Image (cartoon, coloured by chain):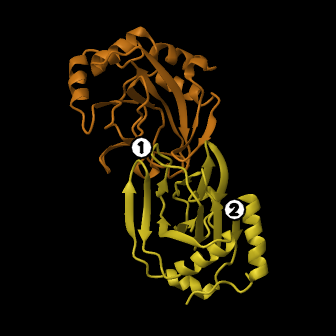
Amino acid sequence: MEWINSKYLNKIPTLKEHFASGKPFPHLILHDFFSSKINVVAAALLKEKFHELNADLYQFQQTDDCKKATQPAVKQFHKFFSSKEFIQLISKITNTKLKWIDMSGFIYNDTDYLLPHDDRLSGRKIAYIVNLSKNFTKSDGGALQFFKGSKIVKTIPPTFNTFTIFRVSPKSMHQVQEIMSDKKRLSFAGWFHG
Amino acid sequence: MVEINPAYDKATLARAAAHLKKEGSVQLNEILVPISLRSFENLKWRHLYNPLKFSLHYSKPPEVWKEFQKLVSELIGKKVKCGMWCLAMLPGDYSVLYDSLKPGKGFIFMFDLNSVPEDCGGYTVLLKGDREVVRVVPRKNSFTVVSQSGLRVFHKYLNHHAKHPRIFLCGVALAK
């Protein structure tokens, strides 16, 4: 588990409790979750090919699934993230039987956004985001926001090396705020599937 | 007082009606004489918000709607019954496609009060399946009619670069 900040490895029971008690739906926000190797991954991700996606619900750039990554650092990160060992760790924390992951890289530029939705699709159990953007402030936008009904009750700024997971359910309504500056919001995101 | 631009005489409207019939949509620019735009002042807005479907501002339409009903009737060539809403999109407003959104019937029409650059969003998209058929980019004092039979509609998220809200009268016309 050389990819994970060692401070988390002996706290699994606590993480499990925090995940289960997360409001408005089970979630965890883990700051400085990955080891310093993540810096190299972030730089490499920017060299991958991104496709512009623009629809009613979203506007951003996305890579193909990272299993097709061309950059060695991204390939290595994907190999770790999709490993049996890591999936078992997330299974323990979330108390959910998980089997496999998908992963894409994302860039949100000025005016990009993702409107409220709940992520529900067959097989998706746990959603995740690995934030890789630096120096975002509140006024830059780009925060992940959780809803309870029609109210935003939790705002998670896109802080570098923060790993966020949440349970996909009819309650898991969330959005990504519009980017309000020239900064790039860089991340990996996807799902752990059951 | 609401007055249609006298440039839209019988012959011009007949050409517009033929275009609508052939192409499925038509946009008439400078549709009202400028003073008529005042009838949209002092509207009272209410925020309509269902995060999974829309964030829009609504107002009861001003009296001008009767003129537009007549105009639509003339363009379609039939008497129509209309439902009409005065809507405003502020930065952050949108509507999306959702599972229970049914394909449209009849004609959708829009009268826009402000121009909004396309890269700010706020435009209306009509789709057949996943294919975009018509995009209505807000243009000041324009009137757009689209045959929306079988089409689904959304209003693109209006981003923070928009200098003005999109204010428009939006209606659906069904032939009687």
Q: Where residue B25 is drawn, which disc sits there?
A: 2
Chain identifier, colour orange:
A
The residue tagged with tag 1: helix, strand or loop?
Answer: strand
- Looking at the image, is A130 positioned above or below residue A9? below
Q: Which residue is drawn at 63% across and 73% down?
A: B73
**Subunit that carries the residue with mark 1:** A
Seen as rendered, the residue at the extreme top is: A84
User: To which chain does the residue with label 2 belong?
Assistant: B
Image position, residue A28 (x, y; %): 30, 30
Chain B drawn colour: yellow
> Which one is in front, A100 or A165?
A100
Tag 1 residue: A175
Q: Picture coordinates of residue A128 (x, y %)?
A: 41, 28
Of B57 and A75, nearer the camera is B57
In the image, is B159 to the left or to the right of B127? left
In the image, which disc is placed on residue B70? Answer: none
**Category of crowding for the residue at label 1, using alpha-carbon neighbours closer than 10 angstroms: few (below 14), some (14–19), many (at least 20):** many
Say what amino acid the circle numbered 1 marks.
Gln
Residue at 47% of width from left, 38% of height from top? A134
Q: Position of residue A172 (x, y in %)?
A: 34, 37
Q: Residue B57 lies in what quarter of the image?
A: bottom left
Out of A171 and A95, give the one closest to the viewer: A171
Relative to A15, residue B75 above or below: below
Callout 2: SS = strand
Label count reads 2
CA distance for labels 2 and 1: 34 Å
Residue at the farthest front position: B176
Q: Position of residue B32 (x, y in %)?
A: 64, 82
For disc 2, the neighbor class at 10 Å (few under 14, some 14 to 19, many from 20) is many
